[in-house]
Image (tube, rainbow, N blue to C red):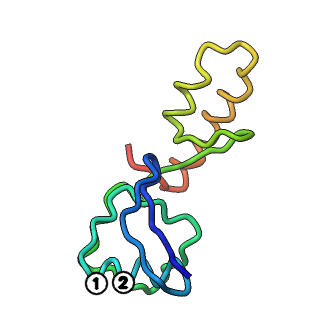
């Protein structure tokens, strides 16, 4: 199967490989020195994977939220739902998600 590692915002293909899963593709990308900056690595089980040399800047330290069919970073979500009176609960949920991410150390401010 062909596995494509894509940029989490643009959807551009950063690396692709015929292999069995995303883990194998990420490890191969690291071995080839691929630039995986901003890669969408959701679902990749990478425990104990040797990723030495891989540029993974922006691939890990982002919290995404999905409300209905919309998927955003917290900042993008705030921009999208700002000023929409009927979305005040969504804004409160974004604040809650941000607080949880900070408590658990998922983001650095």
Q: Residue at x 57, y 25 (%)?
A: 80
Quarter of the figure that contains the N terminus: bottom right
Query: Between residues 35 and 95, which one lies in front from this camera angle?
Result: 35
Within 10 Å of the Cα at label 2, are there few (<14), some (14-19), or many (20+) other Cα atoms? some
| Secondary element at image label 2 | helix
Q: Residue at x 39, y 49 (%)?
A: 108
Against 61, is 83 above or below? above
Marks 2 and 1: in contact by CB < 8 Å?
yes
Query: Between residues 12 and 83, which one lies in front from this camera angle?
Result: 12
Q: Quadrant of residue 55?
A: bottom left
Query: Between residues 32 and 48, which one lies in front from this camera angle?
Result: 32
Residue for badge 2: 28
Residue 77 locus on image (x, y percent): 57, 32
Residue 70 locus on image (x, y percent): 65, 39
Within 10 Å of the Cα at label 1, are there few (<14), some (14-19), or many (20+) other Cα atoms? some
Q: Give the numbered dot on residue 55.
A: none
Residue for badge 1: 31
Q: Quadrant of residue 93?
A: top right
Number of marks? 2
| Secondary element at image label 1 | helix
Apparent side of residue 54 relative to residue 80 in the rendered image (left or right): left
Q: CA distance from mark 1 to mark 2?
A: 5 Å
Q: Residue at x 46, y 84 (%)?
A: 24
Residue 23 locus on image (x, y percent): 49, 80
Apparent side of residue 27 relative to residue 82 in the rendered image (left or right): left
Q: Residue at x 62, y 44 (%)?
A: 65
Against 19, is 63 above or below? above
């Amino acid at each position: 199967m062909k596995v494509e590692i894509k940029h989490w915002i643009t959807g551009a293909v950063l690396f692709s490989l015929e292999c069995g899963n995303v883990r194998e593709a990420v490890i191969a990308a690291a071995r080839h020195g691929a630039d995986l900056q901003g890669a969408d690595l959701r679902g990749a089980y990478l425990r104990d994977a040797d990723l030495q040399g891989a540029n993974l800047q922006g691939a890990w330290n982002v919290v995404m939220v999905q409300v209905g069919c919309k998927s955003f970073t917290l900042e993008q979500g705030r921009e999208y739902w700002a000023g929409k009176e009927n979305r005040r609960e969504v804004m409160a949920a974004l604040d809650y998600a941000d607080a949880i991410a900070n408590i658990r150390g998922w983001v650095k401010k």
